[in-house]
Amino acid sequence: MSMAKRNEGANVNSDINVTPMVDVMLVLLIIFMVITPMLQKGISVDMAKVNNPTPMQDADKEDALLVSVMRDGTVYFGADKLTGGVDTLTGKVKDRLTNRTNKEVYLKADARAHFGSVVQVVDAVRAAGVDDLGLLTEQKKSAPSGPPSTTPTGGQ
């Protein structure tokens, strides 16, 4: 009598099925594409670039008061465009600061905005009774440094 041998190992499929993984990755990609524009707070402004900006983490908070000055002089308070000009900004800032202990406002001004427009906005915000006014800037991209200079510096 011979024994019957079963060969079940030969029927095992060891190929990786990537279709579910691709489906999940496409769903994640779509979610990130939809959510990413919503993460930006306020209006997109090309801010001035400086060497040593002061970090202002409070400007990223949900309840931070942001005033934006665009290149053409348009002023935004948060995401709302001020239709009445800078004159209405003082009243709106006063309304938002009534029950707050932290009277801090952040100003995002375009690097090519007219200086007079920015000064008018600063005056309007100060007239509303703001204690601290933060001017937001970006870090300047550092250029790759060359070889050290061979000329002496300093005096005798």
Image: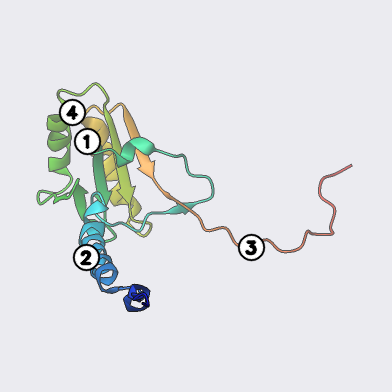
Q: CA distance from mark 2 to mark 1?
A: 31 Å
Q: CA distance from mark 4 to mark 3?
A: 44 Å
Q: CA distance from mark 3 to mark 1?
A: 38 Å
Image disc number at residue 101: none
**Which residue is denoted by mark 4 in the rendering?**
97
Q: Are marks 2 and 1 in contact (CB under 8 Å)?
A: no
Image disc number at residue 27: 2
Query: Which amino acid type corresponds to the residue marked 4 in the rendered image?
Result: Leu
- Picture layout, residue 90 above or below residue 31: above
- Picture layout, residue 5 above or below residue 43: below
Query: Which amino acid type corresponds to the residue marked 2 in the rendered image?
Result: Val
Could you tell me which residue is drawn at 63 percent across and 63 percent down? 144
Q: Position of residue 121 (x, y in %)?
A: 26, 43
Q: Are marks 4 and 3 in contact (CB under 8 Å)?
A: no
Specify the quadrant of the image occupied by residue 97: top left
**Which tag is nearer the camera, tag 4 or tag 3?**
3
Residue nearer the viewer, 110 or 30 = 30
Q: Position of residue 82 (x, y in %)?
A: 13, 49
Could you tell me which residue is drawn at 29 percent across and 60 percent down? 71
Residue nearer the viewer, 26 or 102 = 26
Q: CA distance from mark 4 to mark 2?
A: 41 Å
**Which tag is nearer the camera, tag 2 or tag 1?**
2
Label 4's element? helix
**Which residue is denoted by mark 3 in the rendering?**
144
Closer to the chain start, of discs 4 and 2, is 2
The residue carrying pointer 3 sits among few (fewer than 14), some (14 to 19) or many (20 or more) residues within 10 Å by Cα, namely few
Q: Residue furthest left?
A: 84
The residue carrying pointer 4 sits among few (fewer than 14), some (14 to 19) or many (20 or more) residues within 10 Å by Cα, namely some
Q: Position of residue 127 (x, y in %)?
A: 23, 31
Closer to the chain start, of discs 4 and 3, is 4
Q: Quadrant of the N terminus?
A: bottom left
